[in-house]
Image (cartoon, helix red, strand yellow):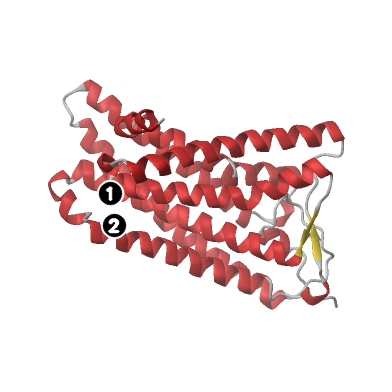
Amino acid sequence: MANTSSVAQFLLLALADRRELQLLHFWLFLGISLAALLGNGLILSAVACDQHLHTPRDFFLLHLSLTDLGSICTTVPKAMHNSLWGTTTISYTGCAAQVFLFAFFISTEFSFLTIMCYDRYVAICKPLHYGTVLGSRACAHMAAAAWASGFLNALLQTANTFSLPLCQGNALGQFFCEIPQILKLSCSHTGYHREIGLLGLSFCLASGCFIFMVFSYVQIFRAVLRIPSEQGRHKAFSTCLPHLAVVSLFISTGMFAYLKPPSISSSSLDLALSVLYSVLPPSLNPLIYSLRNQELKDAIRKMM
């Protein structure tokens, strides 16, 4: 049996066989990554430089932008490199680093999405308690907990995944190193089931966060419907619904990709799902969270 010590590198999924399609994928990924870098970079600069944006909402938005930048810079550059140069290899160390960083940023991002939902719930449903519930110390503690929980989850997942013996080759059916693809190469049933249990626990926690978000939005929508002004109701709905849509896309595609049965697995399906939960959210979040934030738009205009 070959184990992980004999695997020097992994083979990633080639996005296309023809050179023209490889270059097309390179330019598509380049455009998406530049949009994510520009959008999140503007948010980071505006929140850091403008005193009017030092509110709990913008504080959490700054951290969300950091996780978006981290996640897209973890997966997309290597895929762009492989498409441009026509290669598919990634070193063992590089693969382990990619798994750890992706799990770290994705877990932390979901924590901040949950916190931002709670922020909107308190702001709309309990406005008189907003300053007390979400003071500077409470915000700092929630941010620290989000980063720490993401780090711990990524450390456990990565350590357990790369402790498994591999005897099914080194070809991964994905354009970046992902835990389910590495598990397919494992020949240890005990370690495999242990990792599946860890993934199941992570997604149970994520599902709990999602249920909390849905419950919060139900309370938010009930409060919004009591607003006498139609314009006020429209503004509140247009702010909350895109956030809920992106979160739903993020968790549904992620859960399906990680927990779907092997019988319905295919390289094209895995690729489409991974793009939906790993590439699109970092590009869409800056647009969604700044589109209805007039203070943020004003700060960006002033800064530019």
- In the picture, the disc for residue 103 is none
**Residue 285 visible in the picture:** no
In-image side of 263 versus 223 (left or right) = right
Mark 2 vs mark 1, CA separation in Å: 7 Å
Residue 212, percent across and down?
A: 35, 53
Residue 78, percent across and down?
A: 71, 50
Determine whether 94 is above or below 269 in the image. below
Q: Nearer the viewer, residue 238 or 213?
A: 238
Mark 2 surroundings: few (<14), some (14-19) or many (≥20) residues within 10 A: some
- Amino acid bearing label 2: Cys
Residue at numbered disc 1 = 56
Residue 230, percent across and down?
A: 23, 21
- Amino acid bearing label 1: Pro
- Residue at x-position 44% and y-position 66%: 149
Q: Nearer the viewer, residue 199 or 243?
A: 243
- Residue at x-position 76% and y-position 32%: 24
In this view, the residue farthest toward the left is 128
- Residue at x-position 81% and y-position 58%: 171
Residue at numbered disc 2 = 139
Q: Are marks 2 and 1 in contact (CB under 8 Å)?
A: yes
Residue 61, percent across and down?
A: 38, 46
Name the element at disc 2: helix
**Residue 165 placement: quadrant:** bottom right
The numbered mark, 2 or 1, whose residue comes first in the sequence reads 1
**Residue 6 visible in the picture:** yes
Name the element at disc 1: helix
